[in-house]
Image (cartoon, rainbow, N blue to C red):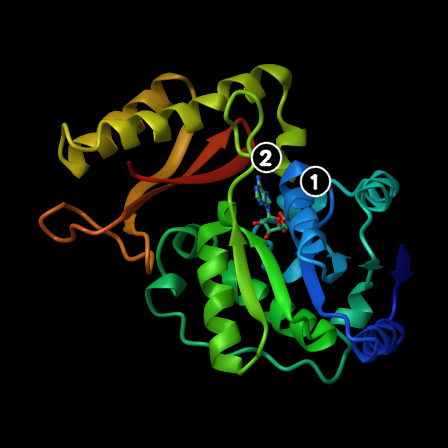
Amino acid sequence: MVLFKTIAALRSHLEHQRNKGRTIGFVPTMGALHNGHSSLIRHSLEQGHYTVVSIYVNPTQFNDPVDLEKYPRPLSADLELLNQIGCNAVFLPGDSEIYPVEGVTTTEIDLQHLGDSLEAAFRPGHFEGVLQVMHRLLDIVNPDFLFMGQKDLQQLAVVRQLISEAGFTTRLVGLPIVREENGLARSSRNERLSASERKKAGLIYKTLLETSNASHKSSLTELKFSALERLEKAGLRPEYFEFVRSDNLRLVHSREEYDGPITIVTAVWVGDVRLIDNMEMA
Ligand code: AMP
């Protein structure tokens, strides 16, 4: 496994791999790696791509300074895991590499409803930061394939739009959510939960599952309110629990409005940690 801290060195290494006929698979991360990340990396490796993982905690996508400060950064454990998995190259840029004083373009993409609903509504500026860093990383790595998790469903849709509008030829592949034993979606932020919070957070998955299974017994409004009530009664603090069209993430309020595939999306505070999850309805 080769480590790079500068854009120039990484670019010339990847050029060399391309000249040898390798396709490039890219997995951008913010580190504190877990099984969710490794499933993306393994997928890329299994497809035979020369696989690059970036670890960069992007400050511009954090709307909450406390969240940024508390974000875990266990770099040596991350590198050990990447080495074990058989990752080919790791990109570890500093802030000045990603955001030099001059020369970074801001990314103006019209996100439409993705820019003001769900995560965008509760985390102002978050997707602007995601667009900025992903535009930069795609410019630097120029991968053939980009692997991202469906856990961050809205992010996936935002990056899909970036790729299409900015004219990248990269193919974006969204991969399924990896969960802990009690169903809690794996997340670097889970590390900040106490043992009892972590146990309690399994209710998010249970609620999604039961809502999904009850989908033909009640209206979407009834399902939403009983899910919110259930989470709140257990001491969790849901920010939203909504139904969206699976194809474009537009909100759906009733089945009369839309009868195609629907995904349930939610954001829930457990103590001082904000978690997101989603599930396609049965
Ligand atoms: P992050 O380090 O949180 O920015 O995540 C890096 C990538 O890993 C993103 O594409 C995430 O969607 C993906 N990811 C994070 N958690 C999971 C998970 N539990 N299952 C699948 N992919 C995940």
**Where residue 34 appears, x then y in whole percent?**
69, 37
Q: Is residue 92 left or right of residue 63?
A: right
Question: Is disc 2 surrounded by few (<14), some (14 to 19) or many (20+) residues within 10 Å?
Answer: many
Give the amino acid at mark 2. Arg
Q: Could you say whether the residue bearing mark 2 is in a helix, strand or loop?
A: loop
Image quadrant occupied by the C terminus: top left
Whole-percent x and y of residue 215? 21, 33
Under mark 1, the amino acid is Lys
Is residue 209 positioned above or below 178 on the image? above
Q: Is residue 238 left or right of residue 244?
A: right
How far apart marks 1 and 2 lie (CA) works out to 17 Å
Look at the image and tell me whether residue 203 can be seen. yes
Image depth: mark 1 or mark 2 in front: 2
282 with respect to 88 (left or right):
left
Of the two numbered discs 1 and 2 on the same chain, state the one appearing first in sequence: 1
Quarter location, residue 56: bottom right
Residue bearing the label numbered 2: 186
Q: Is residue 236 visible?
A: no
Residue picked out by circle 1: 70
Residue at position x 49%, y 48% in the image: 150
Instruction: Determine if the C-beta at disc 2 is less than 8 A from ligand 1.
Output: yes
